[in-house]
Amino acid sequence: MRMDLAMMTFSFRDDLHDALDALVCTTERTLVNLIARPLELLGRPGDHVATAGVLCGQVDGAMRVHEHRERSWPDARFVDAVVEAVLHIVFPGGTAH
């Protein structure tokens, strides 16, 4: 009986995991495409979709570190640092168009 319940639990969790993974992937693709378009309009050289993917990964990673490090620096300082880092990617050399 316990084994059946455990297997049902794992199966249910796997199904939820697959559904959540599909939703996250779709959302990430949409976000990357939404970010890529302004990069193109700004005249940013290079692969706009790849750059948008890097930007999403950079912000996601920064947020994870900030949350898991027990917010070792103030939120305002964190936001300023993320914005500065994103601007360095979008406008290398520090020139905004």
Image: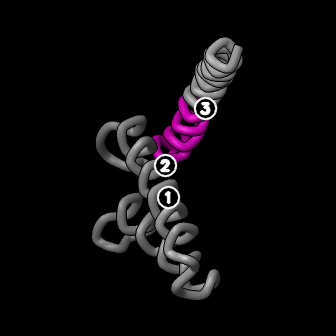
Circle 2 Cα neighbour tier, 10 Å, few/some/many (<14 / 14–19 / ≥20)? some
**Horizontal relation, residue 61 to residue 38: left or right:** left
Kind of residue at disc 3: Val
Kind of residue at disc 2: Cys
- Residue 47: image x %, image y %? 33, 37
Q: Element under label 1?
A: helix
Quick one: which residue is furthest to the front in this view?
1
* Residue 96 drawn above or below residue 43: below
Q: CA distance from mark 3 to mark 2?
A: 13 Å
Residue drawn at (41%, 69%) of the image: 85
**Horizontal relation, residue 38 to residue 2: left or right:** left
The residue labelled by disc 2 is 56
Count of marks, rendered view:
3
Q: Contact (CB < 8 A) between labels 2 and 1?
A: yes
- Residue 61: image x %, image y %? 45, 57
- Residue 88: image x %, image y %? 37, 68
Question: Can residue 80 be found in the magenta stretch?
Answer: no
Please tell me which residue lies in front, 16 or 35.
Answer: 16
Q: CA distance from mark 1 to mark 3?
A: 15 Å
Q: Is residue 26 visible?
A: no
Q: Contact (CB < 8 A) between labels 1 and 3?
A: no
Kind of residue at disc 1: Val
Looking at the rendered image, the disc whose residue lies closer to the viewer, 3 or 2, is 3
Circle 3 Cα neighbour tier, 10 Å, few/some/many (<14 / 14–19 / ≥20)? few
- Residue 83: image x %, image y %? 52, 71
Question: Main structural element of the magenta stretch: helix, strand or loop?
Answer: helix
Q: In terms of image quadrants, where is residue 74?
A: bottom right
Which badge, 1 or 3, comes first in the chain's sequence?
3
Please tell me which residue lies in front, 58 or 9.
Answer: 9
Q: Give the residues in magenta.
A: 28-42
